[in-house]
Image: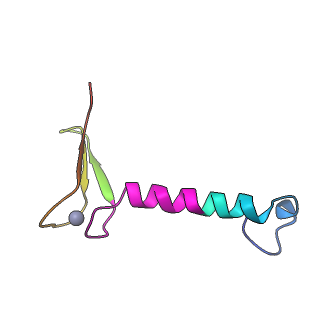
Amino acid sequence: MLSHNNPLSLNISMEEVRTFCNNVNNLKNVFSCDCNRYLRYYSSQEILSCSGPCKNPVRYFKID
Ligand SMILES: [Zn+2]
């Protein structure tokens, strides 16, 4: 989609590309810890938490 040589990208505006990139970046930020590692889903505890050794891990708990 973002390639200059991609014929499918002819009808995509810069604003659409900008919005797409911003959304991808926002998703990356939501699923990243403050230490810049990605979060990982720990199914046995049903939490999203920092994927590495971390002094202050971001954690998301399941909401019932
Ligand atoms: Zn972390």
- Nearer to the camera, 9 or 14: 14
Would residue 27 appear left or right of 21 to someone viewing this image?
A: left
Would residue 1 appear left or right of 47 to someone viewing this image?
A: right
Quadrant observed for ligand 1 in the rendered image: bottom left
28 drawn magenta: yes
> As drawn, which residue projects farthest toward the bottom?
4
Question: Can you give x and y, in whole percent of width and height, for residue 62 in the image?
Answer: 26, 34
26 drawn magenta: yes
**Is residue 37 positioned above or below 61 on the image?**
below
**Is residue 15 positioned above or below 47 on the image?**
below
Question: Can you give x and y, in whole percent of width and height, for residue 19 in the image?
Answer: 64, 58
> As drawn, which residue projects farthest toward the left?
55
> As drawn, which residue projects farthest toward the top?
64
**Residue at (40, 60) in percent of width and height:** 29
In which quarter of the view is residue 1 placed? bottom right
**Is residue 48 positioned above or below 16 on the image?**
above
Magenta span of residues: 22-38
Q: Quadrant of the C terminus?
A: top left
**Residue at (73, 61) in percent of width and height:** 15
In which quarter of the view is residue 38 placed? bottom left
The chosen color scheme is rainbow
Would residue 64 appear left or right of 16 to someone viewing this image?
A: left
Would residue 33 appear left or right of 22 to someone viewing this image?
A: left
